[in-house]
Amino acid sequence: MICNPKHLCFYPMTSAPKNRLTEAAYQCLPGGPLDINRGFYDKVAATGHERTLVESFILPIRSGKAWEVRKGNICRIVAVEGPQVGDLNIWSLHNPRERFWASRTRQLQRAHVSVYDRLWSILPFLRPLVTITGDSLKDYGVDGSGVDAEGGRVHDLLGTRCDPYVNRMLTGQDSDYHCHSNLTRAILPYGLTEFDVHDVLNVFQCTGLNDKDQYFMKTCPAKKGDYFEKRTSFARYPLVLEMWGEGSTESTSADPMLECCRPLGVEVYSLPEGWLEKHNWKEALPNGPAYKGQHALKEVPFGISKS
Ligand SMILES: [Zn+2]
């Protein structure tokens, strides 16, 4: 496909001309779809004592689980015993064709997400699935900058889930407990399959690009009690978290991956009845239907005669 670079002209640039080549390509005017109401989400984050616990569970090592988070509820993932990464997939409960879009979220938000970032759904839906409201690692890195001395950042959107096929290709060995397989098992009760598993948000994963532009993963910096919290933006959907032993690089056992696996905690909370209405919250609607261009379907495809 050919991409039209003029499309970038639709996004207003805000800095001096000399900086325009490297500033964020996707921006909006104040009040636009990417300009989050931070005051509102600060209030959501401050509702700790007002929340009601709807569901909580501990996810055992090398497992996955699908759970439902209703509209407006808050879901918190907790490193209950120490460093542990979780791979997160998100679907709309009533239409699993709508699911998390990692690469576009990387462009609209950033490559490592934290408070105020949103996780967007795929085309043609294109709406925020969740908004991140809490992150105990938001001040990770040198002097709270979000980036450490090696260039690592937390909550990774650069990479994706590990899987048995790449593992087989690179090592010649089979393993049934890669993130991809754990996710696949987790969604079977919802009638979904391996083909529904998609690129993940690696919660608590510290990653970056080295000086050769190659992806690296560092030791997970989460400590016992660290959390990552998000609030649902529309309808209802299951979230799936699975986990794999990426918590620590230090091990002496025969199966080092097993030794460095730890459980994760999941908590789902609701806000008091009427809280969202009182604060003028509105459900996120799909942006796709607003597009009236019919994807240029009136145009004859290249190579096809018009006669
Ligand atoms: Zn993995």
Image (spheres, grey):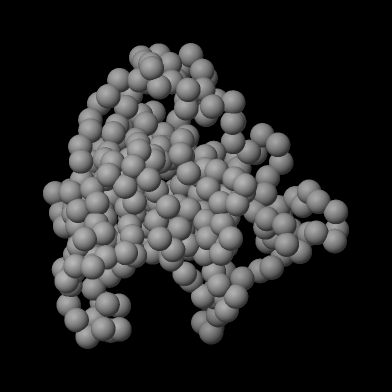
Measured as percent of width and height from the top left, residue 1 is found at 54, 75
Q: Residue at x 48, y 44 (%)?
A: 137
Is residue 159 positioned above or below 231 on the image? below
Measured as percent of width and height from the top left, residue 37 is found at 59, 31
Is residue 162 positioned above or below 80 on the image? below
Is residue 230 positioned above or below 248 on the image? above
Give the side of residue 235 with respect to residue 132, left or right.
left
Residue 117 visible from this viewpoint? no
Residue 19 visible from this viewpoint? yes
Give the side of residue 202 with respect to residue 96, left or right.
right
Q: Residue at x 46, y 39 (%)?
A: 135
Q: How many marks?
A: 0
Give the side of residue 144 with respect to residue 268, left or right.
right
Q: Residue at x 33, y 57 (%)?
A: 247
Q: Residue furthest right?
A: 17
Is residue 259 positioned above or below 166 on the image? above
Image quarter (top left, top right, bottom left or bottom right) of the C terminus? bottom right
Measured as percent of width and height from the top left, residue 84 is found at 32, 52
Q: Residue at x 21, y 60 (%)?
A: 259
Q: Nearer the viewer, residue 161 or 225?
A: 225
Q: Nearer the viewer, residue 87 or 124?
A: 87
